[in-house]
């Protein structure tokens, strides 16, 4: 196979964790560019600058490699949401921070959000489970805050949490697809104002 322009030179020995990160970075580039089905392990190995046997030492197959990437980014999204909610005790600012977490996620990590939100493997059970976990983790964190601060039941708070996450995800993806015609901070503020006008209408518990 002819080396791609981005292929790394071979021959450098790396610690196992560093090699794993290198392989995941190369795989992410290939999966984002080509989608799962068109991505080839040959190309991933070439992009990482390793032989296929080295790649298979770390990941027994393409699906395992894809799932490892999904786990990484689903956890990243959950951590961003958790940090946003913990960043302030002011609920209006919490909403802004939570919306901002989704805008930050889609605009970073080399379009890794496509693996989480736009996977062409969503009908494969382990992939679908991870995609659902991405929604569930963020929604549960948000719904817990809503339930603590309002008189909503657990089910009502969870539905509101799912709605806020869905709005944040879809609007962030649309913003990126429109090539950032609106500055990110302005787009985040617009969506946060919309969300806050709705959620602030629920009565606070004493």
Image (cartoon, rainbow, N blue to C red):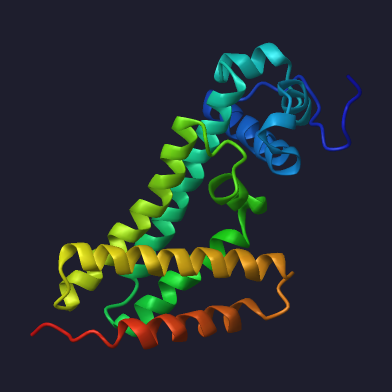
- Residue drawn at 67 percent across, 51 percent down: 110
Quadrant into which the N terminus falls: top right
**Residue 173 picture location, percent across and down:** 61, 63
Asked if residue 194 lies left or right of residue 173, the reply is left
- Residue drawn at 56 percent across, 15 percent down: 60
Quadrant into which the C terminus falls: bottom left
Q: Is residue 15 something that shows in the picture?
A: no
Asked if residue 138 lies left or right of residue 110, the reply is left
Of residues 143 and 185, the one nearer the viewer is: 143
Asked if residue 107 lies left or right of residue 67, the reply is right
Q: Quadrant of residue 57?
A: top right
Q: Is residue 108 above or below residue 146?
A: above
Of residues 114 and 100, the one nearer the viewer is: 114
**Residue 171 picture location, percent across and down:** 56, 70
Q: Is residue 73 above or below residue 199?
A: above
- Residue drawn at 62 percent across, 39 percent down: 120
Residue lying farthest to the right in this orientation: 2
- Residue drawn at 54 percent across, 37 percent down: 69
**Residue 55 picture location, percent across and down:** 64, 19
Q: Is residue 99 something that shows in the picture?
A: yes
Q: Is residue 187 above or below residue 123?
A: below
**Residue 28 picture location, percent across and down:** 65, 39
């Amino acid at each position: 196979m002819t080396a791609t322009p981005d292929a790394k030179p071979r021959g450098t020995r790396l610690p196992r964790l560093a090699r794993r990160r290198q392989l995941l970075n190369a795989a992410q580039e290939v999966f984002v560019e080509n989608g799962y089905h068109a991505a080839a392990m040959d190309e991933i190995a070439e992009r990482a600058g390793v032989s296929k046997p080295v790649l298979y030492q770390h990941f027994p197959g393409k699906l395992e490699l894809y799932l490892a990437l999904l786990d990484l980014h689903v956890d990243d999204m959950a951590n961003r949401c958790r940090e946003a909610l913990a960043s302030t005790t002011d609920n209006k600012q919490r909403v802004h921070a939570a919306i901002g977490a989704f805008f930050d996620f889609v605009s970073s990590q080399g379009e890794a959000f496509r693996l989480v939100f736009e996977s062409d493997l969503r009908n494969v059970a382990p992939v679908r489970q991870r995609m659902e976990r991405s929604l569930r983790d963020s929604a549960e964190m948000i719904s817990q805050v809503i339930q603590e601060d309002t008189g909503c039941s657990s089910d009502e708070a969870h539905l509101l949490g799912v709605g806020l996450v869905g709005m944040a995800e879809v609007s962030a993806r649309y913003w990126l697809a429109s090539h950032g015609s609106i500055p990110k901070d302005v787009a985040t503020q617009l969506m946060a104002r919309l969300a806050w006008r709705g959620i602030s209408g629920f009565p606070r518990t004493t």
